[in-house]
Image (tube, rainbow, N blue to C red):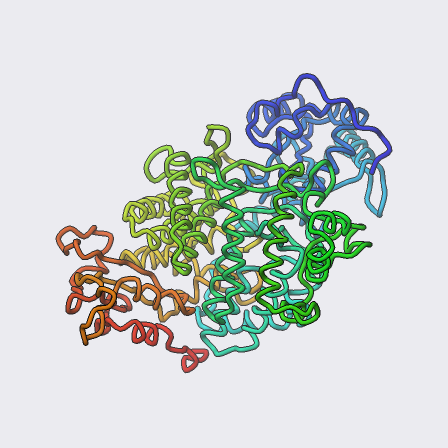
Amino acid sequence: MSAQPPAPRRSVANRLGQETSPYLQQHAHNPVDWFPWGNEALTLARDLDKPIFLSIGYSACHWCHVMEHESFENPEIADLMNRHFINIKVDREERPDLDQIYMAAVQLMTRRGGWPMSVFLTPKLKPFYGGTYWPPVASRGMPGFRDILHGVHDAWTNRRAEVSENAERLTTAIVEDSIPQPDDTPLKPDLIHHAATVACQRADRRYGGFGPAPKFPHSMDLRVLLRAWKRFGDTDALEVVKLTLDQMAAGGIYDQLGGGFHRYSTDERWLAPHFEKMLYDNALLVPVYLEAWQATGNADYLRVVRETLDYVLREMTHPEGGFYSTQDADSEGVEGKFFVWTEAEILQLLGPDDGRVFDVCYDVTVHGNWEETNILNRPKPHAEAAKELGLSEFDLSVRLQNCREKLFAVRSKRIWPGRDEKILAGWNGLMFSAMAQAAQVLDEPKYAVGAERAADFVLSQLQPKPGRLLHVYKDGQAKFNAFSDDYACVIDGLVDVFQATQNVRHLKSALKFAETLRSLFEDVKDGGFFFTSHDHEELIARQKDLQDNATPSGNSMAATALLRLGRLTSRQDLEKTAERTLQLSSSLAKRYPNAAGQMLLALDFWLGPTYEVAIIEGSKPPQAAGSSATSPPPTQLADLLKAVHQKFVPNKVLAIRHASTTDANLPAELSVLKGKPARGGQATAYICQHGTCGMPQTDPVAVQDFLCKTLDRRGHN
């Protein structure tokens, strides 16, 4: 940290004080004369012929806070910035389009990336020098920010031709890299098999996950491995998934008291996370744990799902239903302070007996396991800990539950980490998708309610007119054109909300958004979707993102969403658009499968077999308890739904017709339900493929057996 004390906070905020982004507001009292991205700053740079210093970050970014404290609160550095540059601060979560373009520039210049991102631009917005975090003075092998400011100003003043040439060269490279070329790699199961092979080769066989520290969850890769197990009988793929999910759920990356996952682990054992919690990480991990339960029957995975979603409903939900973006890593200026414990605190709160039991189970020691404090984690299996303590597993579970409740209550009285209350369309789509999936698998109505409320929030607050989306909502304001990944995630989420609630208005909204996605973002010549719409602000490049990062790429989510929506609504045109997007990404999936996980999930759905499951509610009432009837009770809707959701059958869509609904009053979007009566008054399932249906089934066992047919015999065809 710099020896320079922080400057006193300004009594009057700079221009960022008028912004709704918590990240921008965090910098509103810096002595730096910050601008938000917009016409005022860009015009001033051109008029004054000054270079732009562009700083991009997000509110939960620890090193963003560090650079603010060390440099942007430093009066001497701020003076240099204000004299020589037009300084623009951007929240990457509000403007991922800018983040994509200029991150590409930083990666071309430095071969690495990250946040805070720091880039110098010409007044024409072309990058010529950049990096990530810089300390105020040179240290740890990094140049000092003060020296960089002097150097860039000197280059702009005295070597303008060199700067301009560098900017042109970089911009050309960004434009060339932004548009992938069509590819003819065959769309075959081999791509999934190859991806699983590569992932298993990279897997850490001791602690789970992939590669060395730092370790990220890699949710999409884990779901690809589950499909490889299903399709090819690849038991090794399943073992990698189980080990990873077990180790993460037992580690410090998982909040053992409050539920939910932190961003990533700084070590190989999943012990010490960066403590921020991101909505998207939790949204992407919920389906992995749901599918792993379906594949293995391990009930602990359902516990993780429930605790994670309960955390989101409790701590990350707007009163009107939308989901907030992030929780900060820091509280009281210290990373992780809210989450960690000393042994003395534990013993004081729980007493010597329960304290000893808790310490043994949660790795609590007098010296701590992280910076002289303790990150709660479960290094010992529950059965092993019970044996060591001389307790039954049940008794240990009860005692630990009581201990966790006491500690959680005390923790809740601490000073909380900051929360970024932006509501982002795409991230909300990911989370209400996950919540709706959980509602179906767990048969838990509160998750269906939570998912539907969030979907309704997006539809009411982020839809300025039917079929159009805005990107972000905060403090009563919705703004910025939505991006292709926003549309794709919302469409996919609405498909899941429809399946959980059978409310057809969500399906209708999904179809409207699908038409907008195609009309405003599709590349009709080469396939796939641009990240920005045809009517978006003109930037130095218009990218077509294919590679997954922390979240799925817009193209991979578009392929997923359009395939599922098309199959559910019998819209082959949507499926054809998705197929073109898959083809565009086929080479990426072959060469870099770990960057194409979501696209491989879509490919698995497209390859099939993929089922349209149509369930017709029966008209016979349930048999009364104690009835003497000798015939078996009629099959009920709940029995068939349980059969559909209990096992791992990833490639299916579901529609339900209630007993009072006739063919004449079925919505046009649900032709999959037409002409399918209930058999003998009992709830009946029709399992179809592209509209061709098998025999109607009223036996839940028969339904499950049919859906769970193995794919082993398909091999690599």
At x 28%, y 58%, the residue is 655
Image check: 319 left or right of 75?
left
Left or right: residue 203 compared with residue 359? left
Residue 579: x percent and y percent?
Answer: 39, 61
- Expressed as whole percent of the image width and height from the top left, the position of residue 465 reads 34, 34
Report the residue that reaches farthest toward the left. 664
The residue at the point 43 percent across, 67 percent down is 604
Residue 323 in view here: yes
- Vertical comparison of 504 with 48: above or below: below
In the image, residue 196 sits, relative to residue 173, either above or below, namely: below
The reply to whether residue 131 is visible in this rendering is no
Q: Nearer the viewer, residue 338 or 655?
A: 338
- Residue 508 is left or right of residue 92, and the answer is left
The residue lying at 32 percent from left, 51 percent from top is: 501
Considering the image in quadrants, where does the N terminus appear?
A: top right
**Residue 431 spot, x, y in % from top left:** 47, 49
Between 642 and 579, the residue placed more toward the observer is 642
* Quadrant location, the C terminus: bottom left
The quarter of the picture where residue 486 lies is top left
Image quadrant in which you'd find residue 563: bottom left
Image coords of residue 557 (percent x, y):
45, 54
Foreground pick, 117 / 312: 312
Q: Which quarter of the picture shows residue 561?
A: bottom left
